[in-house]
Amino acid sequence: MAAQDPARSHGPSHGNTPAAWTAVSVMLVGFLIGAIGVVMLAWPLFWVGVAVVGLGVVVGKVMAMMGFGAPPTYIEPGAEERAEGHRAPDA
């Protein structure tokens, strides 16, 4: 079995964090509210759904800033090219 390429690794979580789950759940409810508003031709309800989607983005970002998100990863410049066997051009 081949070893995993560290330059292509996105960390162990793949967004599987409380911040991501909460953000997606809130946005899913917002889309549902907006869809019901469109089907019922209740445009104020549609705009409430749009606001809930925006709230989901804010909630997810705030939770990530509170430490409930994935830790930031740093990829050294040029690491992807070296991992693929390419050589950086000479300056």
Image (cartoon, helix red, strand yellow):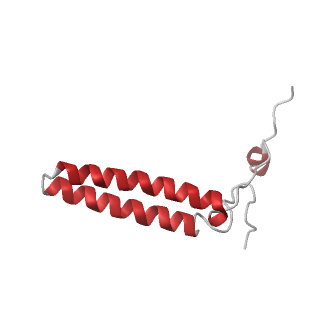
Residue at 21 percent of width and 50 percent of height: 44
Total residue callouts = 0
Question: Which quarter of the image is occupied by the N terminus?
Answer: bottom right
Residue 12 to residue 83: above or below: below
Task: Give residue 53's quadrant in the image.
Answer: bottom left
User: Can the viewer see residue 85?
Assistant: no
Q: Position of residue 45 (x, y in %)?
A: 22, 54
Nearer to me, 49 or 1: 49
Residue at 62 percent of width and 63 percent of height: 69
Q: Is residue 57 left or right of residue 67?
A: left
Residue 20 to residue 49: above or below: below
Q: Position of residue 64 (x, y in %)?
A: 61, 59
Residue 29 to residue 57: above or below: below
User: Can the viewer see residue 22?
Assistant: yes
Residue at 45 percent of width and 63 percent of height: 24
Q: Is residue 3 left or right of residue 15?
A: right
Q: Residue furthest right?
A: 91
Q: Position of residue 6 (x, y in %)?
A: 75, 59
Q: Position of residue 21 (x, y in %)?
A: 50, 68
Q: Is residue 9 left or right of residue 56?
A: right
Question: Which quarter of the image is occupied by the C terminus?
Answer: top right
Q: Residue furthest bottom?
A: 1
Task: Give residue 26's quadrant in the image.
Answer: bottom left
Q: Residue furthest top?
A: 91
